[in-house]
Image (tube, grey):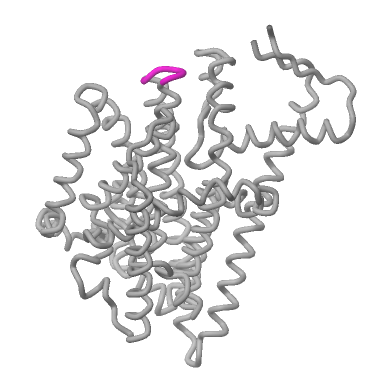
Amino acid sequence: MPLSVSSGGGSPKRTVAKRNRKRDIYNLTHGLEARVIEEKKDFKQFGTRSAMGVVLSVMKRMVELDVLRGFLLLMMVANHSPSPLRQITDQPIGFFSTAEAFVFISALLAGLVFQQRRDKLGFAAARAATLQRALRIYRAHLITLFVVFAVGSLFLASVPGIRYILSKFFDSPTSAVAGSVALLFQPPLLDILPMYVIFSLVTPLAFWIAGRVGWRPVFATSVGLWLLSQFNVREFLTAPVRDQAFVQIGPFDLFSWQLLWMAGLMFGRSLQQGKSLLRFSPRTEVVLLFLAIGFTLSRWTCAYLNFDASGNFRFLDKWHLGPLRLLNFFLVAWFVAKAMPYLGRWREYLRPLSAVGQNMLPIFSTQICLSVFVAGWISVRHHSVDAFATLLLLLQVVIAFVVAYLLEYWKDRSIAPRAISPAVTVA
């Protein structure tokens, strides 16, 4: 029996409820990682019922993750600031940062959506959507980079901090632009989006191979690459080109970080299929909890002693994802995942954070640009920068919420004509 939604009369509360449902569907459809129906051709090619089924079945799972991503983005803004608040937001619950959480959550959503789209629309549609996603991230990376290049060279070229961050660009602008297009030129703070582009391109390949040989060989290969990366394989392979003007490779070792991405894909796929990759007994979970607490206490003990454990212990290394660092992240992620369902009770109160998470890509790009410029402005001050840096940080946080609000407002306006259109029928 068909389900019809008409534009007939109704109470104001019912009208608002309908509009909110449509806005939630739109946000999910056009969100950063959870973009399920990305092109109108999907509706035309595969049918409205299949496409809408994808949207409705994943909606309930995305809100909590959007809240978490919004919260992590604000922490990242603080971590990129010279404000003293960074001492609290940088690795607050162990020897891992927001970067690990971002990569894993992004991969989890990518795996969930890819599996869901493949189940509903086929592998070709899932692959096309993922490649479109990679193209959007690539475009955002280039826009972000060129804005920093333009503003830095035209208005801030004499600022020491900017000259330091963009030193190779000022030495050879043409080579830097060419290297940026090829994802080979990655100045500080501008090296994260290229990693997402590459991992997004690899995602369809991982699913294709796993469809033929299973996920265990795929994960075993990923673990093997990670093990090799612990012996500085990337540094050996890139040594011949590191001095080239068009090359500035970021500190993230992709041979290491791909393991986190592959694990996220597998967990996202299992979430979509309603399966559990791992199960622990209550007694084992108690042991894991004590280990997580131990990592947190160790991290703050090192901070109190002014000792950089991540920089001095190879097993805690950030850029190569040392084994203890991975273990620490897994422990915390396990218990955060168990607590995530409780966020649903605070959904309305956390809507501003959710809006930030839903509009991650434009807000992330905006904040990266601001962080680069803030670093430059701070460098020209000769007295204590604590208060000034904290003020600029709070301004960045406000800007993040304002941009999220404006993007949500624009979405609502674009939905409004459809909200009053006659008779939408889902068979």
Magenta run includes residue 267:
no
Residue 190: tell me if it is visible.
yes
Residue shown at 26% from the left, 75% from the top: 309
Q: Position of residue 155 (x, y in %)?
A: 50, 70
Q: With respect to residue 407, does 132 lie above or below?
A: above
Side of 127 relative to 227 (left or right): right
Residue shown at 68% from the left, 6% from the top: 1
| Quadrant including the C terminus | top right
Say how many tags the image has: 0
Q: Nearer the viewer, residue 297 or 118?
A: 297
Check the image and name the residue furthest to the top: 1
Please tell me in which quadrant of the rendered image residue 109 appears: top left
Q: With respect to residue 209, does 93 lie above or below?
A: below
Q: Nearer the viewer, residue 125 or 207?
A: 207
Q: Nearer the viewer, residue 7 or 156?
A: 7
Q: Position of residue 279 (x, y in %)?
A: 34, 42
Residue 198: tell me if it is visible.
no
Residue shown at 59% from the left, 15% from the top: 48
Check the image and name the residue furthest to the front: 283
Please tell me in which quadrant of the rendered image residue 162 appears: bottom left
Side of 202 relative to 346 (left or right): left
Magenta run includes residue 122:
yes
Residue shown at 42% from the left, 56% from the top: 145
Q: Position of residue 292 (x, y in %)?
A: 36, 63
Please tell me in which quadrant of the rendered image residue 293 appears: bottom left
Q: Nearer the viewer, residue 387 or 98?
A: 98
Q: With respect to residue 17, does 168 lie above or below?
A: below
Q: Main secondary structure of the magenta part?
A: helix
In the rendered structure, which segment of residues is drawn in magenta?
A: 119-123
